[in-house]
Amino acid sequence: MIALFIISIYLSTALAIVLSVLIGLLWLATAQFQLLPQVLKGCPVATWAVLLYLCFIVGLCYGDAPSAEAYSMLRKYRELLFIPLLSCFFTNERYRLWAWKAFIIGSVLTLLISYLMDFGIMDLFRHKTYTLKSRITHSIFIAFFMFFCAHKAFDDRKYMRWYLLLFIFGVYNLFFVVDGRTGQLVFVLLAPLFAVQRLGKKELLFATAILAVFLLLYINYSDKSARIYEGLTETQAYLYHGPEKAPTSMGIRYTFWENSLKLVSQKPWLGHGTGSFGEEYRRLTDTKEAIKNPHNEFLLIAVQFGIFGFVIYSGFLFCQYYCSRTLLDAEKWLAQGLLLTLIVTSLLNSPFLDHAEGHWFAVMIALLFAPNSSLRKHEKQSA
């Protein structure tokens, strides 16, 4: 069931919701909750996830947010609880192996369906961005999958050609079919991280040169790079002409960030409470538009829970880096790549507010950090 749930995250929100409820019931029926103390003790990342969710619960006690907004926000961030919940299952190696297979199947299906849409074979279901999910979500999933495929090509000689083929198809899809800017940025940052993790000095320089040449050719000669130019142009318009003269996609986003910082400054320590962003933003800007998200996870949390919440979320991220160092190399490298993906996504969007991204990150974090003696350096060395 967990494998089906992971695949459903890529394909169907409705199915993912149903399966998430069934997994919760399975967690209770099979007494997996008995492992919770062990998980929280052996997986600090899960503990930080619970602390972060507690911020949303405590935030219900103060602030002027409408009850509907507050409880809606609490429900949307419930995927944080999936980190300790799924970690209980992933202490079992069999569940872990099936989860990784589901991750690969879901990623391959996402790529395949995107290409079928691009070729017009699935014309009846065609989305203007050739994705089942949003362009942002799709590009994030594919960027990390490329990072995964690159590592597997190094480690798995038997299937190296298949992983390299998937890597090539993924890169082409990311830059020439879907062209999601968030995923492209994630990939551009994951590429040098991979090079540092796996290559020597000479190979590192060579890989850096290849990436630089690819980006130069892409930006200067591909019409698919138009959205990158668009983003740069909109940023310049905002910086030099002011947000009031730049009603563009990036200009609006920068305005969200600027106004969010103003809201944080009004109640810097504990913030405005759970679900308060929309109401407080309307009050500050005197707008009638329903703005519920500043497209920045750090700011969304800081507006609601102040510096305290910001520190908790930062601790959640730092804990992932700290704990990654205790893992064996293969898992450590993937965990560091996932952390970089989450940080970049958090700077440009609110991943845990989004259903697909939030559940995907929860699954991957649990999969990589769940207590498992076969993944720990010190336990492996002492065995």
Image (cartoon, rainbow, N blue to C red):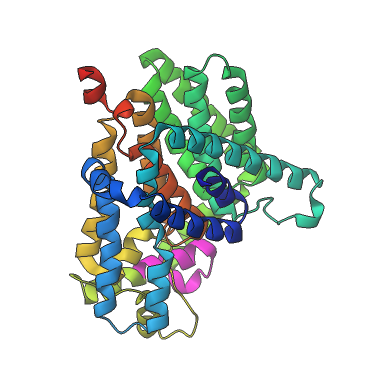
What residue is shown at x 37% (from left), y 77% (from top)?
A: 70
Residue 49 visible, this orientation: yes
Most prominent secondary structure in the magenta stretch? Answer: helix
Q: Where is 61 relative to 155, above or below?
A: below
Decide whether residue 177 is among the magenta residues: no
Quadrant for the C terminus, please.
top left
Q: Nearer the viewer, residue 128 or 145?
A: 145
Vertical relation: 57 (above or below) 199? below
Give how far across and how far down residue 160 sits, in percent: 57, 18
- Give the left or right position of residue 139, taking residue 91 as reference: right
- The residue range painted magenta reads 242-258
Image quarter of residue 195: top left
Decide: is 140 above or below 279. Answer: above
Question: Residue at (40%, 40%) from the top-left corner?
Answer: 367
- Left or right of residue 273, residue 232 in this image: right
Identify the image quadrant of residue 214. top right
Residue 146 screen position, x and y as percent: 53, 33
Residue 319: x and y, percent?
24, 44
Query: Residue drawn 26% across and 66% down?
Result: 55
Residue 248 colored in magenta in the image = yes
> Which residue occupies the foreground of this view, 195 or 30?
30
User: Residue at coordinates 47% horizontally, 32% vertically from top-left?
Assistant: 97
Please state the horizontal and vertical placement of residue 347, each as a whole percent of the image: 38, 54
